Amino acid sequence: MTDGALREPTFLILTALAAAPQHGYGILRDVEEISGGKVRLRAGTLYAALDRLSSDGWITVDREEVVDGRLRRYYSLTDLGAARLAAEVSRLRAHTRTAEQRLRARLTGGTV
Amino acid sequence: MSELEKRYRRLLALYPRDHRERNGEEMLAVLLAAAGDRTRPGWRDTADLLWNAFTLHLRRLLATDRGVDPRDVLAIVSLLGPIAILSEAVRGLHELAWFVKAGALFDIPWLYQIPDAPLWVAWFAVAVFALKRWRVAAAVGAWVATGGFVLLELYAPAQHLWTSLDAGWVLLGLLTAVALTFSPGPARGLELVRWRGVRFMAGSVVVLGLFAVLGFAGMAESWPWLVLLSACGLKATGGSRVGRRAALVLAVPLMSVSLWNVLGEWAFGVNLAFFYGIPLLVLLAAGGLPRWPRRRAA
């Protein structure tokens, strides 16, 4: 597990899988929704990321289905992936808190 | 099959085979679901697929995708390395054949004509020990035999150019000794290449060696001969990603001869940097050697 910041697509994919397993197309739609339409992953990028996350042990294949003759594979977050996402959330929260404090100080004209 | 699906399939065909087999159909389903009423792939999808196919190929080439375990690469080298090294014995065997043909077997000036003979006997023993999976004996023998290369450079420098043209054999000897000492060893190597790979490697060394013994001794330094030997190494190691990298390690003598043809002879220190440094960098870049110590599991 690395301690560096997660890239945005990785963060969003892990977030999309945090509550329940999802299939590829579901992750694409969810990432778009979570990011307020700002991040639109494409299939090539998504599956390269899924491959990497899978080899890192952060996600795993939950189950497979065939729908309308097409393979649908569901991915889920592993405990390791959930811990990594939680660490990233803590890191972002700490940064956000500091940023808010500094902005408040700026508005009140005081010092930090 | 719609025209759109055909076009997406063509783009997906550019992906590495293992990725395509694992994700291809699923990616196709996602691409078609996201396409809406489009009849041709959009340029963003096309660029995304092309770029990711390229980066996945690159990651596999540089073995940064964790799909290659360098310990397995070295395990194969620990098994086949000693056999491959015996190829270099053909020059001495060629001399021996000449004296036999001349009916002067007992008149051979060994120290002058074939000073490296004990080395090849040692490597032959290492090969036998490795095949019997006597790892410790093979590792000790490999270190001793590799040390023999250095002694030859000091006491019989006229016979070989161990720091330039023939550096690949010394480096292969060193890597074989390292592999026998630190990798899972010949037993694991045998699991990966099976006896078929061993037989092919040994057979190739014997056949190519016979050509050089019956032909001319310099053949063993010639580029085509080493290309053939390296190709046989590639076949023997099985063609898997791990196998291809093991074959690259076995092809180190070809690298040094190729470099020598391009760079020629330099001062001692420069020779070492060129003929040892460059092949090592190539092996590191291609994932043929471990790039960092293995981290312990938490």
Image (cartoon, helix red, strand yellow):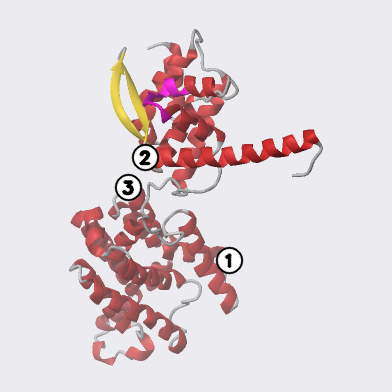
Q: Residue at x 29, y 50 (%)?
A: B238
Q: Nearer the viewer, residue B201 or B298?
A: B298
Q: Residue at x 51, y 39 (%)?
A: B55
Q: Which dot marks residue A38?
A: none
Look at label 3 and name its amino acid: Ser
Gap between marks 1 and 3 measured at Cα: 32 Å
Q: Is residue B172 above or below residue B58?
A: below
Residue B289 lies in the magenta stretch: no
Number of disc labels = 3
Q: Which residue is mark 2?
A: A79
Q: Which residue is mark 1?
A: B263
Q: Which quadrant of the structure image shows residue B126?
A: bottom left
Is residue B95 something that shows in the picture?
no
List x then y, in percent, for residue A25: 43, 20
Q: Which residue is mark 3?
A: B240
The magenta-colored residue range is A18-28
The answer for which chain carries disc 3 is: B
Q: Nearer the viewer, residue B10 or B105?
A: B10
Q: Secondary structure at mark 2?
A: helix
Is residue B139 something that shows in the picture?
yes
Look at label 2 and name its amino acid: Asp
Q: Is residue B285 above or below residue B157?
A: above
Q: Is residue B165 left or right of residue A111?
A: left
Which comes before the other along the chain, label 1 or label 3?
3
The answer for which chain carries disc 2 is: A
Q: Secondary structure at mark 3?
A: loop
Q: Secondary structure at mark 1?
A: helix
Q: Nearer the viewer, residue B72 or A7?
A: A7
List x then y, in percent, for residue B267: 60, 78
Picture quarter with the C terminus of chain A: top right
